[in-house]
Image (cartoon, grey):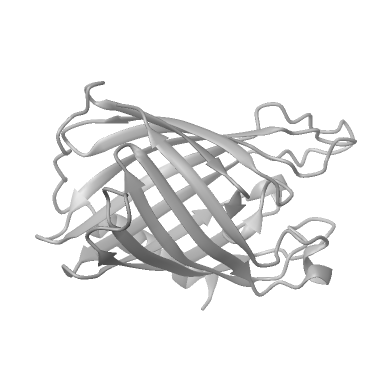
Amino acid sequence: MRVTKLKTALLGVLAMSCIAPVAHAEESAWGPFSAGVSLTSDYRFRGISQSDRNPALQGWVQYDHASGAFANVWASSIDFNDETTYDSGVEIDLTAGYNFKLGENTSATAKAVYYWYADADTPPTTTRDYDYWEFIAGVSHDYGKIGVSAELAYSPDYFKKSDESTALTAGVSAPLMEKFLFFTGGLEASGHLGYQWYSDNSVATGTGLPDYLFYDIGFGTSWNQIALDVRWVDTDVNKTQCGSDWCEGGVVVSVSANLP
């Protein structure tokens, strides 16, 4: 599929999203704000490790308006092994968007995300800084016993100013058990399958990566405010193409806590 077609599809989803706003669910003790923290054994973004296959600490704060508008700040520790160049250690994602209702069991989201590598020092010999924008549209439908979703993400100038990128991701989730051991949230299975395109795959000016497939499959459960997720995450990029083992498959375990 050509990138131009994906751009057209993105605009189409954004247009569909204008049908009706989704009312926000019951507010938490913080009012329209919510927050949480997470510890993951490996921070993966579209299948590729952002933490050198090591644990990462993450946290977020989100504001939700009754109209469907929302904004959040999400942060994670990272490790790109770039101590002699950019020397980055944290990623901060700034997001603003809107949730929409397309039908009784169908909803959509349109949002803009700014990926900010706050402590990265761009070398004086280059203008290829890490920071970049993505514009994301997504739809989801609840069939009762199973939920499906699709997301399209487009960046006009991707990571390290490597030109355009587009990612298309499909997801599915299904409850398996209403009760699971001592957990209060039952047991759910979920998975994602996606493809990432780059307009420039060269090492000198682009990402240095081929267009690639990424996927994950796993299980999630919860106990009150604590959520546990265990899944296999992988790509079809080999170690030579990746330049490291960051693209290779592995089990990722994440524990999250939503603040009351």
Q: Image quadrant of residue 205? A: bottom right
Left or right: residue 133 versus residue 97 is right
Q: Say if 36 sits above or below 113 in the image.
A: above
Q: Say if 108 sits above or below 173 in the image.
A: above
Left or right: residue 165 versus residue 220 is right
Q: Position of residue 79 (x, y in %)?
A: 73, 41
Residue at figure coordinates x 57%, y 51% from the top left:
156
Front residue of 29/158: it is 29
Q: Where is residue 131 in the image (x, y as percent from the top left)?
A: 64, 38
Q: In which quarter of the image is the C terminus?
A: top left
Residue at figure coordinates x 38%, y 29% from the top left:
35
Front residue of 79/166: it is 79
In this view, which residue lies farthest toward the left?
A: 104
In this view, which residue lies farthest toward the front?
A: 181
Q: Say if 3 sits above or below 229 in the image.
A: below
Q: Position of residue 61 (x, y in %)?
A: 40, 28
Residue at figure coordinates x 22%, y 31% from the top left:
65
Q: Position of residue 52 (x, y in %)?
A: 74, 49
In this view, which residue lies farthest toward the bottom?
A: 1
- Counting every numbered tag in the picture gives 0
